[in-house]
Image: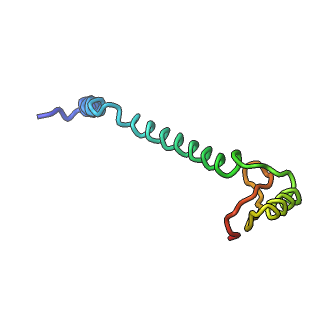
Amino acid sequence: MSSRKPSAKAKRVAEFKASLGGLDDAFNREKRKQTKRAIEREHALEAKACTTKKRYAYRSDAEEAIELCAQHGARGLHCYRCPYCDGWHLTSKPKA
């Protein structure tokens, strides 16, 4: 039978937590993993939406590029304001 003293109970609780192998740290590690994945995902989205595309400083420049592309056979291009660089990029996706 176990002791009923608070100090004995605290000792048993501490031993139990130690036997878990640092479960509290497991939650922190998982939180760090989730944060890292979110950052990596944001970088991947930025690369896909911005850094791999030609940037136009003004909408008129992007629209001029669309006209030039149309002269060479590319149809259905649109321009959009980039949320990452604040410039303009071209896309072939239909307007939403």
Give the residue displayed 72% in from the left and 49% down from the top. Answer: 53
Return the x and y of residue 76 as percentages of the image width and height.
73, 68
Residue 54: x and y in percent read 76, 49
Q: For residue 40, what is the image quadrant?
A: top right
16 or 82: nearer the viewer? 82
Is the C terminus in the top left, top right, bottom left or bottom right quadrant? bottom right
State how the image is colored: rainbow
Residue 75, percent across and down?
74, 67
Image quadrant where residue 29 sits: top left
Residue 92 in picture, x, y percent from top left: 69, 63
**Quadrant, the N terminus:** top left
Pick the residue in front: 26 or 82: 82
Q: Quadrant of residue 58?
A: bottom right
Q: Is residue 18 above or below residue 33?
A: above
Q: Tell me: residue 48, above or below residue 12.
A: below
| Left or right side of 49 for 19 | left
Q: Residue furthest left?
A: 1
Tell how many labels: 0
Q: Nearer the viewer, residue 28 or 46?
A: 46
Which residue corresponds to the image point at 71% horizontal and 49% vertical from the top-left?
A: 50
The residue at 85%/51% (across/down) is: 57
In the image, is residue 51 above or below residue 20? below
